[in-house]
Image (cartoon, rainbow, N blue to C red):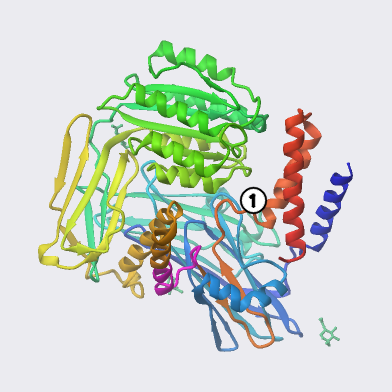
Amino acid sequence: MGRQATVLLLFFLQIATSQPQTRGDWDIHSFHVNTTVTCRYAITVITSHVFNRNDNSTEIDFHVKIPKRAFISKFRMTIDGRIYDGVVKPKEEARQQYNTAVSRGQSGGLVSAVGRTLEDFKTSVSVAAHSKVTFELTYEELLQRRLGNYELLINAQPGQPVKDFKIDVSLYEKPGINFLQVEGSLATNDLGSAITKSHVDEKAWVKFYPTQDQQITCDGCGENGLSGDLKIIFDVERPHSKGDIREYGGFFVHYFAPTGLPRIPKNVVFVVDQSGSMAGKKIEQTRTALLKILGDLAEDDHFGLICFDDRISPWKRELVRATEQNLEKAKEFVRTITERGATDINAAVLEGVKMIKKSHKEDAASILILLTDGDPTSGETRPERIQSNVREAIGKRFPLYCLGFGFDVNFEFLQKMAQENDGVARRIYEESDAALQLKGFYEEVAVPLLTSVQMSYRGAANLTQTSFSYYYNGSEIVVAGQITDINDFSTEVIGISTDSKVTYSGVEPIDDDKLPAEMSGFENFLQRLWACLKVKQLLEKELVLTGEEKEALRKEALDLSLKYSFVTPLTSMVVTKPEGEDSQVANKPKEGDKSADDAEREYRKSITFLSKTSFTKKGKVMRMLHEGKYVFHLLKYILGL
Ligand SMILES: *[C@@H]1O[C@H](CO)[C@@H](O)[C@H](O)[C@H]1NC(C)=O
Ligand SMILES: *[C@@H]1O[C@H](CO)[C@@H](O)[C@H](O)[C@H]1NC(C)=O
Ligand SMILES: *[C@@H]1O[C@H](CO)[C@@H](O)[C@H](O)[C@H]1NC(C)=O
């Protein structure tokens, strides 16, 4: 009880010291969001003009949310005609130079993770009485095709009604945009009339210009103005199955997403954590998702189900065909899955690998999916050993996807394990739609169309990743690079369809020398797209390397981040302010790192959990460990470490 009381005290202390959200004594004269998308590369500029109407100098906040997948590339403040530009530096250098300034500041950094899709960017600056400040933030991202479309997410919550409020999105996609839809909380009834969209062939525009009145009266709005998201969802025409190549300024990008191929039957094994920590909603949502997923298997698919805690409980020892009868039996089994003991990831995944290998068929695509919500706590518990065991067992024969459910997973461990085995790791957020998130992930890998896809280019260099284990329906393979000899430029894609090799060659690059007027100022977008993709891939690869190899990739990623001024996990942006104010440092939050907000949210959750659940001995120990972690995070936060 003593421990609980301490934690509670710290918790309230923390609430008391956090700043209340009040509307500041300033007027936002304008709030503009401009996004330009071309070749799926989105560059967004948020500009806000603010006036201090106080008779005294005032600390003015700038607080926006940006997509997690984006890199910040510019931040500028203009105060009384003076410009203060953020400067991107190697993270280590920024940390050493500005450590003192940052630790004196009230929070750890300018950017923090706020959840599933967004990051918070927050700064403030002191502005003299009756003076103005302009904030300008630019971020960039390569939109990724999922389930047949791209989604551009724009968040807006200026904190007060703004007279001149505009969101402008322009899209330019050769060879044409085939549909365009606007969704999100800002696209609802009351505000629907503030949206206009138009779409002609390869160009489209979305404008969102709500009046000040609308910003006050809309559903969920008030004196703090509106707050919400716009989602622009679109897809592009694909006239050639061999893909499209765009060329500009010495760089190219190749989009490959053939349709019209037959689906390849799957061998899919689900390895599902049923340890004690899955108790309650998580296990319920997992059951719901599995039932739906089973319902979607095709009859020529084969599947396996393995539940695990400290013991392994396969439904059947071997893969079975997805006949109606087998599916019914599997569903019965799924309904009986309940939470039990500790977590033996090693044994469970190895059992899954064995199952797939035993019934290996040449003309099927094998997929292993691990769902877990915790660290390995039973059997082999050393992450490095589990990784090497799994890597050896799989031997690059099929991909492993790792789904981390909730916040107690060692996400980096899952990322490494997936990365080493040609898969990806995803986070499943512990929210009411977790079952949908699980199903959504499964749908992305539900229809393999090609395996062993190899993309080759002549007359080009500095290519991004060119080999891909699988190509799934609804996704897209993207390769970018530098053109070294346009007269000798040629392409070839080889992949394996149901039973035969397929080759696509000779894609004609579309020369984009005439960009539309909307694109002025973004002329080097293709080079930036290449750099953005390259940095992301280098960081993924680097994760599973060690020693000199790791250092070499890190250096390459760092150099590119600096050259294009991207705020990536290796760089920081130092924001220098007028004299007398401390500089601040913007870092890219790491997926899986718990920021103070997370600790608070988790702690709240654990309190609710505490009051609802009775514990086994094992549960008690785990809970104490968790509490220790929260105390540590809260202390860290309070002391501003
Ligand atoms: C934003 O977009 C509008 C319309 O396309 C354009 O007139 C304006 O100059 C843009 N503003 C910025 C800051 O790029
Ligand atoms: C402005 O500053 C003066 C002197 O520092 C102080 O007396 C006054 O209360 C302040 N006014 C406001 C509105 O904060
Ligand atoms: C792939 O997806 C498209 C569009 O969603 C669909 O029309 C097509 O039938 C799918 N292909 C297969 C083999 O399922």
Depth check, front residue: 383 or 509: 383
Q: Is 569 in the magenta?
A: yes
Q: Is residue 82 left or right of residue 14?
A: left
As drawn, 307 above or below 277:
above
Q: Is residue 348 visible?
A: yes
Residue 45 position in % (x across, y down):
47, 69
Depth check, front residue: 478 or 517: 478
Residue 598 position in % (x across, y down):
67, 52
> Which three-letter amino acid code belongs to the residue tagged 1?
Asp
The answer to which quarter of the image holds residue 94 is: bottom right
For this orientation, the residue located farthest to the left is 487
Residue at 77% over, 34% down: 620
Depth check, front residue: 386 or 584: 386
Residue interval drawn in magenta: 558-570
Q: Is residue 20 visible?
A: no
Residue linked to disc 1: 219
- Quadrant occupied by the C terminus: bottom right
Residue 349 position in % (x across, y down):
48, 31
Q: Is residue 467 left or right of residue 42?
A: left
Q: Secondary structure at mark 1?
A: loop
Residue at 47% over, 64% down: 71
- Quadrant occupied by the N terminus: top right
The answer to which quarter of the image holds residue 26 is: bottom right
